[in-house]
Image (cartoon, helix red, strand yellow):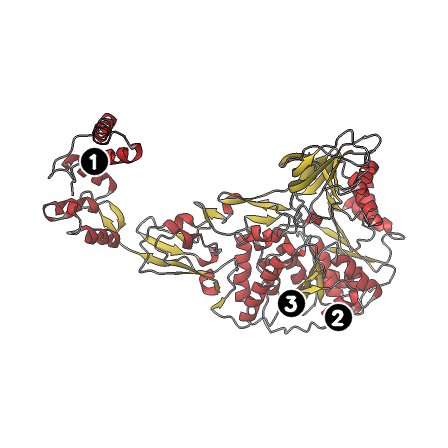
C-alpha cells in the first residue's frame, strides 16, 4: 500500500458466508482504516458511498460486485485510487477459512499496489475476407458472408463445382504457398492461380494458371483442410479455421468472421529496447532465445537486434521470460511492478501472522475459474496458498521465481492447463534454473514447479500433496528496483544472502541466461575484440593500461565474445558464482603497454610488439642484415611510424631498382606483339591462351625485388 495516502479498506463477510477478516486485515495493513461488514453491496452500500465521497484511496475486498461499486464511484465523482481484492473464493470460502486471515490481509495489501496499463496497438479491418476452401462449401460460406463483408472465394484444386447462375462475389482457383500478416493486413502468395471461364457450364472451368500471384485480405476463413497457414494459428487475430463438415464449428467461424469489421485495440504486450539486445554483432549471431520460442513468428532478425511485430504478438511473454538482458520486457505488469506486488503479499502475510506461504501464479482465463470452482464446489485453497494473478504464466522470468523464495515463500507454483494455449518450454527452462539455485542454496528440492490441472479435484490433490520443507531462515526484505536485469541480479544475490546453506557456485544448463567465461590467458593477445562485441558490458577494458575485465553478473552467455575472438581463447561456462555476482569486475589479463621509442606514447602491449619483432627479425628480407634498423617502425606509435616511413624513404626496390610503371597501353602493346608473332608462325590466333601468355610475359618481365 502507498503509505502517503490514507486508505479505507472494506472487508465483507458476504452475508456471513465466510469469517470476518477485519481484524486480520487491520493487523497486516497497519496504516489502513478497516471497516468490516456483511453486505456492502446492499444493506451497507451507504457506508461505501460515504467513503468514496470523502476518501482518496479505497480498497473493497470484493470483486463480484466491482461493477456496482464502480458505478457508485462515478456517481459521487470519486477521483482517487479504487482497488478490488477477491478474499472470498481465494480465502474465505475454504475448509481452512478460519485460518485464512493472514492471507486475506496479504491479498488486500497486494491489490493496492499500482499496476501500469500497457499501450495499445490498433488493428483495422473493412471486412475484406478471403474464404479458402475446396468445393461448394466454401462458395456457400462466401454467400453467407457476402451481405456484410467483401468476399473472395479461393478454391484449392476444385473438382466438379457447379457454377453460380449469378456471381455476386469473385470465385478463383489457387493454392496458397505462404501467408504473412495479421488482422487487417494479410499478404498471400498463391500458386496455380486462375480465374474461371465465364462460359463454364456443367462445372467450373478455369483459364491458364500461373504461380506466384499476390493477394491481400483483411480476414481469412480457412476451410481447406490443409495445414494451417500460420504457426500457433489459433493465436493469429483475423485467421479462422473450420471443418466444413462440422456445422456448429463452421457457424461459429462465420459469426467470428463477421465480427472482424472495424477497429480493434490490443495491448502492446512487450516493451523492446534494441540497444540491450544481444542477438548479433558484426554479422555474428549471438542470442536467439526469443526467436526460438516465439510461437507466432512475431519476432524476426533485424541486424544486430531482433524486431517484434506488436500486431502479430499474442502476448505469451515467453520472449520476455527468457530474454537475458531485459531487451524484451513484459509490459503489464512490468517486472518491477510484479515483484513489488509479490513483496507486499509475502511481507504482509508474515506480518499478519501467516507461515509457510506458497505462491500460486495463475492466469485469468484458466486459473481463475479453476480456483473459483474449487472454492464453490470443493474445499477451497489451503490457508497458506497465496494466489497471484498474471496475464500469462509464460511471462514469468527467473526473477519472478527466485524473489518470492528470498522473501520467505516455501514454494512457488504456476497453475497451467494440461492443454496450454502457449508453449511452456520457456517456462520450464526458468523453473529448472530456479530449482537448481534453490537446491544448491538449501531451500529444498523442487521449490518451484508447475501444476497442470484442468479439474478442481486435480488441483486440490496437487496442493494437498505439497509438504515442502521449510528450513529455518530469515527472509529477505529487499526492495525490487531497476530494470529487469537488475531485478534478476538483486533477487539472486538476496536469495544467496537468505540461503539456509549457501555455496560459492553452482553449475547451470547451457541455455541459462547467465554464467562465466573460461579465458585462455596465454592465448589472449588483448586485442579487445571481445569487448567491442559484448552487448552488456560484461567484458570491459581500461583506459590506463591494456587490460581485460569481466563482470560475471552482466554476462548473458550470448557467445558473441567467443565467436569474435580471433585466438579462440574464450569458452562459455554456464554457472552462477554467487561471490562473483557481488564482487567488482575481475581482472582476466593485464599487461604493461609498449611505449613508442620516439615519443614515449603508450600503445599496444609489450608482449605483442616483442612477439612481432621476434617473428620478423632476421627472418624477412626487409628486416635482415643492413635492413634490421627498419624494425624500429614496429616499435613506434601510429603517428611516428608514418613520419619515419615518409622521411627516411623506406624503399623495397632500393637494391634492385624500381621498374618503370606500366600502363594499359603497355599491356595492350605486348598483347598485340605476341598475337602478331603467333599469326606469323601458325597462321591463326587462339585468343584465350595467347592473351593469357602475353599477360604472363608482361608480369615476368617485372623486376623481382625479393
Q: Nearer the viewer, mark 1 or mark 2?
A: 1
Q: Nearer the viewer, residue 381 or 569?
A: 569
Q: Residues within 10 Å of mark 2 (few under 14, many from 20)?
A: few
- Please, which residue is most extreme toward the right here? 43
Q: How many numbered callouts?
A: 3
Can you tell which quarter of the image residue 125 is in? top right
Q: Is residue 394 visible?
A: yes
Q: Residue at x 59, y 66 (%)?
A: 475
Q: Nearer the viewer, residue 531 or 387?
A: 531
Secondary structure of the residue carrying tag 1 is helix
- The answer to whether mark 3 and mark 1 are in CB contact below 8 A is no
Q: Is residue 50 visible?
A: no
Q: CA distance from mark 1 to mark 2?
A: 91 Å
Q: Estimate the x, y position of residue 682 in percent, counting from the top left.
A: 23, 32
Q: Residues within 10 Å of mark 3 (few under 14, many from 20)?
A: many
Q: Quadrant of the C terminus?
A: top left
Q: CA distance from mark 3 to mark 2?
A: 16 Å
Q: CA distance from mark 3 to mark 1?
A: 84 Å
Q: Which mark is residue 697?
A: 1
Secondary structure of the residue carrying tag 2 is helix
Q: Nearer the viewer, mark 3 or mark 2?
A: 2
Q: Nearer the viewer, residue 498 or 362?
A: 362
Name the N-terminal-most of marks 3 and 1. Answer: 3
Q: Estimate the x, y position of residue 565 in percent, counting from the top left.
A: 38, 53
Secondary structure of the residue carrying tag 3 is strand
Q: Is residue 168 left or right of residue 678?
A: right
Name the N-terminal-most of marks 3 and 2. Answer: 3
Q: Which mark is residue 566?
A: none
- Name the residue that disc number 3 marks: 411
Q: Which mark is residue 461?
A: 2
Q: Nearer the viewer, mark 3 or mark 1?
A: 1
Name the N-terminal-most of marks 1 and 2. Answer: 2
Amino acid at each position: 500500500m502507498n503509505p502517503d495516502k490514507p486508505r479505507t479498506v472494506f472487508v465483507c463477510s458476504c452475508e456471513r458466508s465466510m469469517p470476518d477478516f477485519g481484524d486480520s486485515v487491520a493487523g497486516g495493513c497497519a496504516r489502513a482504516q478497516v471497516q468490516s461488514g456483511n453486505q456492502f453491496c446492499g444493506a451497507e452500500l451507504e457506508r461505501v458511498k460515504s467513503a468514496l465521497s470523502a476518501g482518496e484511496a479505497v480498497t473493497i475486498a470484493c470483486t463480484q460486485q466491482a461493477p456496482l461499486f464502480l458505478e457508485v464511484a462515478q456517481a459521487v465523482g470519486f477521483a482517487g485510487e479504487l482497488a478490488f481484492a477477491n478474499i472470498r473464493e481465494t480465502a474465505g470460502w475454504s475448509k481452512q477459512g478460519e485460518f485464512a486471515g493472514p492471507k486475506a490481509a496479504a491479498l488486500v495489501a497486494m491489490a493496492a499496489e499500482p499496476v501500469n496499463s500497457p499501450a495499445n496497438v490498433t488493428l483495422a479491418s473493412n471486412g475484406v475476407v478471403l474464404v479458402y476452401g475446396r468445393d461448394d462449401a466454401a462458395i456457400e460460406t462466401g454467400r453467407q458472408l457476402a451481405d456484410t463483408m467483401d468476399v473472395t472465394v479461393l478454391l484449392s484444386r476444385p473438382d466438379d463445382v457447379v457454377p453460380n447462375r449469378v456471381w455476386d462475389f469473385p470465385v478463383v482457383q489457387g493454392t496458397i504457398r505462404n501467408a504473412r500478416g495479421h488482422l487487417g493486413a494479410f499478404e498471400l502468395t498463391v500458386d496455380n492461380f486462375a480465374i474461371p471461364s465465364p462460359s463454364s457450364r456443367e462445372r467450373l472451368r478455369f483459364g491458364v494458371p500461373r504461380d506466384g500471384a499476390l493477394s491481400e485480405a483483411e480476414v481469412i476463413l480457412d476451410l481447406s483442410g490443409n495445414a494451417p497457414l500460420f504457426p500457433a494459428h489459433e493465436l493469429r487475430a483475423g485467421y479462422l479455421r473450420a471443418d466444413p463438415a462440422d456445422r456448429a464449428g463452421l457457424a461459429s467461424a462465420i459469426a467470428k468472421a463477421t465480427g472482424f469489421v472495424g477497429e480493434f485495440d490490443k495491448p502492446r504486450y512487450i516493451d523492446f529496447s534494441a540497444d540491450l539486445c544481444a542477438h548479433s554483432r558484426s554479422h555474428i549471431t549471438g542470442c536467439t532465445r526469443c526467436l526460438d520460442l516465439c510461437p507466432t513468428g512475431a519476432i524476426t532478425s533485424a541486424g544486430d537486434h531482433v524486431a517484434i511485430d506488436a500486431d502479430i504478438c499474442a502476448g505469451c511473454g515467453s520472449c520476455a521470460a527468457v530474454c537475458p538482458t531485459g531487451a524484451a520486457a513484459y509490459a503489464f505488469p512490468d517486472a518491477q511492478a510484479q515483484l513489488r506486488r509479490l513483496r507486499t503479499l509475502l511481507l504482509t502475510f508474515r506480518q499478519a501472522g501467516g507461515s509457510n506461504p506458497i505462491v500460486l501464479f495463475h492466469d485469468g482465463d484458466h486459473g481463475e475459474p479453476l480456483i473459483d470452482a474449487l472454492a464453490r464446489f470443493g474445499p477451497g485453497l489451503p490457508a497458506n496458498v497465496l494466489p497471484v494473478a498474471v496475464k500469462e504464466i509464460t511471462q514469468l522470468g527467473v526473477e519472478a521465481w527466485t524473489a518470492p523464495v528470498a522473501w520467505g515463500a516455501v514454494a512457488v507454483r504456476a497453475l497451467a492447463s494440461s492443454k496450454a494455449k502457449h508453449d511452456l518450454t520457456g517456462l520450464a527452462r526458468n523453473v529448472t534454473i530456479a530449482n537448481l539455485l534453490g537446491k544448491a542454496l538449501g531451500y529444498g528440492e523442487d521449490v518451484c514447479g508447475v501444476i497442470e490441472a484442468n479439474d478442481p479435484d486435480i488441483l486440490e490433490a496437487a496442493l494437498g500433496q505439497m509438504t515442502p520443507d521449510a528450513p529455518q531462515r530469515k527472509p529477505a526484505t529487499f526492495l525490487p528496483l531497476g530494470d529487469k536485469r537488475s531485478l534478476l541480479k538483486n533477487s539472486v544475490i538476496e536469495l544467496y544472502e537468505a540461503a539456509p546453506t549457501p555455496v560459492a557456485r553452482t553449475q547451470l544448463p547451457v541455455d541459462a541466461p547467465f554464467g562465466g567465461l573460461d579465458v585462455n590467458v596465454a592465448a589472449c593477445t588483448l586485442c579487445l575484440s571481445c569487448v567491442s562485441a559484448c552487448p552488456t558490458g560484461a567484458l570491459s577494458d581500461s583506459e590506463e593500461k591494456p587490460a581485460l575485465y569481466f563482470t560475471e553478473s552482466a554476462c548473458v552467455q550470448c557467445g558473441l565474445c567467443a565467436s569474435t575472438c580471433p585466438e579462440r581463447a574464450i569458452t562459455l561456462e554456464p554457472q552462477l558464482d554467487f561471490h562473483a555476482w557481488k564482487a567488482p569486475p575481475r581482472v582476466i589479463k593485464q599487461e604493461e603497454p609498449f611505449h613508442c621509442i620516439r615519443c614515449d606514447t603508450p600503445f599496444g602491449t609489450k608482449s605483442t610488439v616483442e612477439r612481432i619483432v621476434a617473428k620478423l627479425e632476421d627472418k624477412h628480407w626487409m628486416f635482415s642484415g643492413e635492413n634490421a634498423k627498419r624494425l624500429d617502425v614496429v616499435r613506434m606509435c601510429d603517428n611516428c611510424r608514418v613520419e619515419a616511413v615518409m622521411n627516411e624513404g623506406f624503399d623495397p626496390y632500393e637494391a634492385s631498382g624500381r621498374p618503370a610503371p606500366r600502363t594499359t597501353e603497355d599491356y595492350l602493346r605486348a598483347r598485340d606483339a605476341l598475337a602478331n608473332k603467333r599469326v606469323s608462325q601458325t597462321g591463326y590466333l587462339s585468343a584465350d591462351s595467347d592473351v593469357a601468355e602475353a599477360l604472363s610475359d608482361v608480369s615476368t618481365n617485372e623486376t623481382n625485388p625479393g
